[in-house]
Image: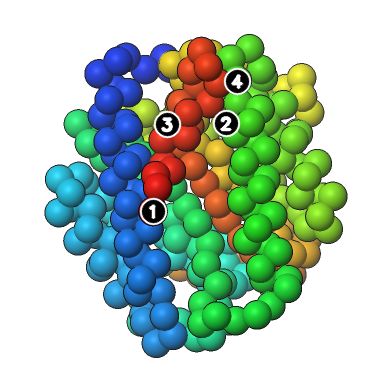
Amino acid sequence: MVTEGSIKTTEQIVSMKLACEIVAKALISCEDILKVGVTTEEIDDFLRTFIEKEGAKPAFLGLYGFPATACISLNEEIVHGIPGSRKLIKGDLVSIDCGAIINGMYSDHARTYLIGNEKNIVKEKLISVALKALDIGISNSIPGNKIGIVSQSIEEYVLSQGFDVVREYVGHGIGTQLHEPPSVPNFGKSNEGALLRVGMAIAIEPMVTEGDWETRMLDDKWTVVTKDGKLSSHAEDTILITENGPEILTRIKK
């Protein structure tokens, strides 16, 4: 049985837009400190301070017991990395996944960065393919489409670029909770999934792998890595389904 997402009220949408604007600004501002020698804990502290100064609450902190404001995942780590004392080095791929809450409404946003002006074709392509896959998925997020159209379009593009998409972790609906129905996989068939309707909000988040899509969890019971140890990239936006098509709530001008 497919579970469809809730339709947001006008008031809820206003709060969601503000929460999304705050987390988008937080990640843009964070780019200035993503340098060799900075610890992932320092990045997390920066994001928590920024979000709280904007009058929002960190969406991830304490959620399901997660101990930080952001999931910060490096290289072969796909998602849910716990910030700590690890220092960034030149050539690191750093995925930052973060959210904010305003008036009980959630936002969710992720980007991957290459540290230290490293020139690496594979790493740069991983980042660009995840972003392009995200854009393709968003472009198909129109009323009347099934989620499967979004999913299939993402998978087909990523595979065409010589990479793969994670199957075990997917995008999701979002609103009064961070994770709501419907599921938004990055793979599948066009006739599958919930029907997109005006007023729904979803988080689309391609997780792109250099090698195989299979994953494993580290002993911390949070950090998910590629099973083959190869690199990964992650991109995510929160989207509102409108009569005029998808509205990307987590993108603002720099």
Is residue 125 positioned above or below 195 on the image?
A: below
- Of the two numbered discs 4 and 2 in the rendering, the one whose residue sits closer to the viewer: 4
Any part of residue 185 in sight: no
Helix or strand or loop: what does disc 4 sit on? Answer: loop
Residue occupied by mark 4: 142
Q: Earlier in the sequence, mark 3 or mark 4?
A: 4
- Of the two numbered discs 3 and 4 in the rendering, the one whose residue sits closer to the viewer: 4
Q: Position of residue 191 (x, y in %)?
A: 76, 19
Marks 3 and 2, how far apart at CA? 10 Å
Name the residue type under label 2.
Ser
Q: Quadrant of the N terminus?
A: top right
In this rendering, position of residue 51 left or right of residue 140? left
Name the residue type under label 4.
Ile
Q: Nearer the viewer, residue 223 or 134?
A: 134
Q: Earlier in the sequence, mark 4 or mark 2?
A: 4
Residue occupied by mark 3: 174
Q: Earlier in the sequence, mark 1 or mark 2?
A: 2
Tell me if mark 1 has few (under 14), some (14-19) or many (20+) residues whose alpha carbon lies within 10 angstroms of its own.
Answer: few
Name the residue type under label 3.
Ile
Helix or strand or loop: what does disc 1 sit on? Answer: loop
Q: Earlier in the sequence, mark 3 or mark 1?
A: 3
In this rendering, position of residue 1 left or right of residue 45? right
Label placed on residue 183: 2
Q: Quadrant of residue 245?
A: top right
Image point 21% across, 46% down: which residue? 57
Dots 3 and 2: beta carbons under 8 Å? no
Name the residue type under label 1.
Lys
Image point 78% across, 45% down: which residue? 157
Tell me if mark 2 has few (under 14), some (14-19) or many (20+) residues whose alpha carbon lies within 10 angstroms of its own.
Answer: many
Residue occupied by mark 1: 254
